[in-house]
Amino acid sequence: MDGLTKFAPRPTGVGEMFQLLRDGKPRTRAELAQITGQARSTIAVRVDVLLASGLLAPAGEATSTGGRPPATFVFNADARIVLAIDLGATHVRLAVTDLASTVLAEQQEPAAIADGPGPVLDRLADLALDLIAAAGRQVTDLAAVGVGLPSPVDHTTGRPVSPPIMPGWHNADVPGHLRRRLHAPVLVDNDVNIMALGERQTEYPEIDHLLFVKVATGIGAGVISDGALRRGAQGVGGDIGHIAVPHGPQVLCHCGNTGCLEAVASGGAIAAELTRAGVPAETGADVVALVRAGNTAAIRAVREAGRTIGSVLAGSVSLLNPSVIVVGGNLASAGEDILAGIREVVYQRSLPVATQHLRIVASRSKGRAGIYGASVMAAESVLSPAAIEALIP
Ligand SMILES: [Zn+2]
C-alpha cells in the first residue's frame, strides 16, 4: 500500500470490519460503530452485506439497559467449508474444516506420490468428495482448497518446482487439476510452510517470530517473521535441508551437493548410519521405533542428529531471532532426544540475547499442523479484507 491509498477513504471498509468479527464474539451494530469509528448508518449497510453473504449470522439480542434490546451478530464459520490436504511422500491427510479451521471430518490414507500427479490428484479428489459427504456437506459448500506438498512450490502458480522426491511433478498444474474436480479455488504451498502456519494458528497465535522445523524423510523449515509467513523470492525460503553442515561428513545428497543437513541428519540418513553400525533400519519410522524400544545406538544417533540440526539452526537463530522453534515431522515423535541435541548446540552457539527467551519445543499438533495450516491458508484467501470487499456488487 503506498502513502496515498493508505489514507484514502475505503469504499466501505467492510473487509476490515469483518476481521474484527472473526474472533467469534457476538457484537451489536452500536459496538461495531464504536470500535470502527464509523457512522451507525454505514455499519448497518455493512452488516446487511455480510448477512446476505452468509458470513455473518444473527446471534440473538444483547442485554438491554432499557428499551428494546439490540440485535447481535456473529461470524458464521459454518457458512462454507474448506478442504485441507497435506500430502506427504508416503501418506496423505485430508480434512474438511469450517471457515475458522475447526475440523469437521478427517482422514489419513497411504499415498504413493511417485505414481505421478495425474493418478495421485484424481485419488485425492475422490477422497475429498467422500470426506465432504461424510461431513454431511455438499461440494457446493466448498469455499477453497488448501494443499501442502513435500516440494518447493511457486506459491503464485501453485505448481511444484523441481521436486527432488516427486518424480514427474515438476510444474504440474496441481490447482487446475483439483479445481476441475472440486470446483473451488485451490491454493498450494510447501508442506513445511503450511505446518508453520498451522502450528502458529493453533498453538502460538500471539507469537510473531516462529520457525517450524520438519525432520522426516527431508529436513526443512517454515519461517514466520513479523507475524507473516516468509516464502522468499522463489518460494524456497526456509529450505535449510541443503545448508552444508559445518565440519560435517561429506555425504552425497540427492541435490548433487555433499554434506547437506538432509544428507546427514534426516530420518533416512540416521537409518543408514544405524544399519552400517549393525542395527538394521530403513526409514525414519524404523529409527523412531528403535528409540521407543530403548535401543541405545538409536538414541545416541538421534541425539547426534539433533546436534547436527542445531549447528545449522544456530545460524538461523542469529539471522531471524525467532522466539519459538517448533520441531515437527516424524523424527520429533521420537521424544526428547532430538530436542535435547538441538537445544544443546543452539544455546551454545547463539548469543545469549537471542536465546534468553527462545523456546525450542516439539510440535503439539500431533501431526495435524499441515492440515490446520492448509485450512488457514485456504480460509484466509476467502476471508481476507480484499476478498470480503470483493463480495460487494
Ligand atoms: Zn542437498
Image (cartoon, grey):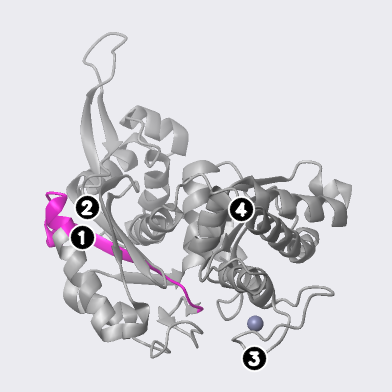
Numbered circle sitting on residue 142:
1
Give the vertical position of 68 relative to 51 (above or below).
above
Out of 232 and 126, give the one closest to the viewer: 126
Q: Magenta segment: does it hold 136?
A: yes
Marks 3 and 1: in contact by CB < 8 Å? Answer: no
Residue at screen point 38% across, 52% down? 15
Answer with mark 1 or mark 4, whichever residue precedes in sequence.
Answer: 1
Marks 1 and 2: in contact by CB < 8 Å? Answer: yes
Residue at screen point 55% across, 76% down? 235
Q: Amino acid at mark 1?
A: Leu
Per the image, label 3 sits on a secondary structure element best described as loop
For the residues marked 2 and 1, what is the alpha-carbon distance in whole angstroms? 6 Å
Q: Is residue 190 left or right of residue 314?
A: left
Numbered circle sitting on residue 390:
none
- Extreme residue toward the top, this view: 66
Q: Which residue is mark 2?
A: 80
Q: Amino acid at mark 4?
A: Asn
Answer with mark 4 or mark 3, whichever residue precedes in sequence.
Answer: 3
